[in-house]
Image (spheres, rainbow, N blue to C red):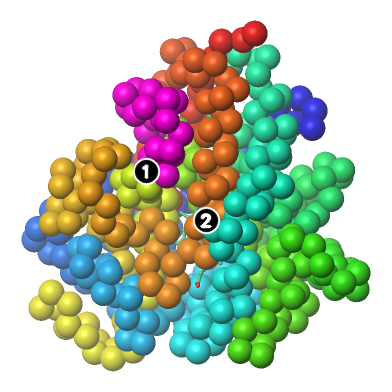
């Protein structure tokens, strides 16, 4: 790839900022608000996400909404998929555009079967193979090496926004010799994400982007099937995948690919930027990581606990339930506040402290239970590679003193707006 790609794609950077703004909410101190809720009102009737000014998936369903704040309650809700179902996500999120095939919005056997077909393509072993074949070479040559001689950069727009989309594009097995096709794919991917907000304009743009992605993706799936689908790329794996005698049709694979775009891009971009921010905020951790790369997972896991990207999980009650003495009617929406649960002082000692050595306890940055992120290992491997290569190839990487320090903020989607860095040039 040429240095041209180091100039941030304007559409992409703007799309990313737009989506961030829709989900950011206001600037109140959410840690304090959540702490107060955990202590005094751990189940609240109402949608705290909307109250804090952020676009919410729970907002426009017409059903009663309850927000829950404690770790134990969030775990209970995410674990019990019979009582707390996900079908509501078909109505409020991207399910509207996916012909009912959005896995996050499926329940029961339908979900179990689809997950059973998909899971073997996302195992740690597959990711270790992709790390060597697709991910490290791509991030090194396309994102990190072009930076080396520059001496300074803003990491969100030059690296963070684009690398996860490029990784998805690569693991799908699309050819890497057509930059225009990649850019079209990437721009549509971000528009799709905008459709998750309760914003009519963004929803319309997302719908069009989704439609435009259908035909080329279906054609790629059909071509792969016709040529035997023997490769280790994701489309070929999904064509070969089988679970309890079931396989995926070309239409289903096309829809899964379209669904992956919003699931795999923004989340990974923001988690990368959050992790870089934590490293610069904690120079002692940065030094330990420079000396010992085996700490990468701990730093990433603690980054996701401290600042999960997607901070609310939405479910619907199938029966009347009681949580913390509050009776919640059947058919209500539960908005599980992951941002609060991950800082619950009854589970995590000094929860607001970023501590990579803390005792490992379940946190919910990748969700929990049946719907736990299927792309978790992919996300971990690509973020590890991006961070590791930046540290390897950009000597003495540090914050640029000419810019404000990055700050992780946001109610519904978290992350820093920008991470300006400098390094020593050869
Ligand atoms: C750091 C990056 C990521 C974060 C923080 C993240 C977070 C999450 C969370 C919290 C859920 C659970 C949703 C729920 O319970 O309602 C989820 C589900 C999912 N994620 Fe991720 N994700 C990331 C990256 C990825 C990637 C790279 C992929 C690529 C395949 C992906 C695909 C999915 C899918 C398909 C589901 C639905 C699983 C199901 O419903 O069974 N995610 N993700």
* Number of other residues with Cα within 10 Å of mark 1, as a class: few under 14, some 14 to 19, many 20 or more: some
Q: Percent x, y for residue 336?
A: 31, 66
Q: Which mark is residue 330?
A: none
- Image quadrant assignment for residue 240: bottom right
Could one spot residue 426 in this view of the protein?
yes
Query: Which residue is painted at 28% across and 91% down in the image?
Result: 319
Q: Is mark 2 within 8 Å of ligand 1?
A: no
Could one spot residue 263 in this view of the protein?
no
- Image quadrant assignment for residue 238: bottom right
* Secondary-structure class at tag 2: helix
- Image quadrant assignment for residue 29: top left
* Secondary-structure class at tag 1: helix
Q: Percent x, y for residue 114?
A: 58, 80
Q: Report the magenta stretch's main SS.
A: helix
Of pointers 2 and 1, the one earlier in the residue sequence: 1
Q: Percent x, y for residue 322?
A: 17, 82
Which residue is labeled 1 in the image? 298
Write the start and end of the magenta stretch as one range: 277-300
Whether residue 281 appears in magenta in the rendering, the answer is yes
402 with respect to 62 (left or right): right
Query: Which residue is painted at 57% across and 54% down in the image?
Result: 378
**Is 378 drawn above or below residue 13 in the view shown?**
below
Q: Is mark 1 within 8 Å of ligand 1?
A: no
**Foreground pick, 382 / 108:** 382
Which residue is labeled 2 in the image? 377
Query: Which residue is painted at 38% across and 47% down in the image?
Result: 301
**Foreground pick, 28 / 350:** 350
Q: CA distance from mark 2 to mark 1?
A: 14 Å
Query: Marks 2 and 1: CB-CB under 8 Å?
Result: no
Whether residue 195 appears in magenta in the rendering, the answer is no
**Foreground pick, 264 / 172:** 172
Q: Percent x, y for residue 168?
A: 67, 53
């Amino acid at each position: 790839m040429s240095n041209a790609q180091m100039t941030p794609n304007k559409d992409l950077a703007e799309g990313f900022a737009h989506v961030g703004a829709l989900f950011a909410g206001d600037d109140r101190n959410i840690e304090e608000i959540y702490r107060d809720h955990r202590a005094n009102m751990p189940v609240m009737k109402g949608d705290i996400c909307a109250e804090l000014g952020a676009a919410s998936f729970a907002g426009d369903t017409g059903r009663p909404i309850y927000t829950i704040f404690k770790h134990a309650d969030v775990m209970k809700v995410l674990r019990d998929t019979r009582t707390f179902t996900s079908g509501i996500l078909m109505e409020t999120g991207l399910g509207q555009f996916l012909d009912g095939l959005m896995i996050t919005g499926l329940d029961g056997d339908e979900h179990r079967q689809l997950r059973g077909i998909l899971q073997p393509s996302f195992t740690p072993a597959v990711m270790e193979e992709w790390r060597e074949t697709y991910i490290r070479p791509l991030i090194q040559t396309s994102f990190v090496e072009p930076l080396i001689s520059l001496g300074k950069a803003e990491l969100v727009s030059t690296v963070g926004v684009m690398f996860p989309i490029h990784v998805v594009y690569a693991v799908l097995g699309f050819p890497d010799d057509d930059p225009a096709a990649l850019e079209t794919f990437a721009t549509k991917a971000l528009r799709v994400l905008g459709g998750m907000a309760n914003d009519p304009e963004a929803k319309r743009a997302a719908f069009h982007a989704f439609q435009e992605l259908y035909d080329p993706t279906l054609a790629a799936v059909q071509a792969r099937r016709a040529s035997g689908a023997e490769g280790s790329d994701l489309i070929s794996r999904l064509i070969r995948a089988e679970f309890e005698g079931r396989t995926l049709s070309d239409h289903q694979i096309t829809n899964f690919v379209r669904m992956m775009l919003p699931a795999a891009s923004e989340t990974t971009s923001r988690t990368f930027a959050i992790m870089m921010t934590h490293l610069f905020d904690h120079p002692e951790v940065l030094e330990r990581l420079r000396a010992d790369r085996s700490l990468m997972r701990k730093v990433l896991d603690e980054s996701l606990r401290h600042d999960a990207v997607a901070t609310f999980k939405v479910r619907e009650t199938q029966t009347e339930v009681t949580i913390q003495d509050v009776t919640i009617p059947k058919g209500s929406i539960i908005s599980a506040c992951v941002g609060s649960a991950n800082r619950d002082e009854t589970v995590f000692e000094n929860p607001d402290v970023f501590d990579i050595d803390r005792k490992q306890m379940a946190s919910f940055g990748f969700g929990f239970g049946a719907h736990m992120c299927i792309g978790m290992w992919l996300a971990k491997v690509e973020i590890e590679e991006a961070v590791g290569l930046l540290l390897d190839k950009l000597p003495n990487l540090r914050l640029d003193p000419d810019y404000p320090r990055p700050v992780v903020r946001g109610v519904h989607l978290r992350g820093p707006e920008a991470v300006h860095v400098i390094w020593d040039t050869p």
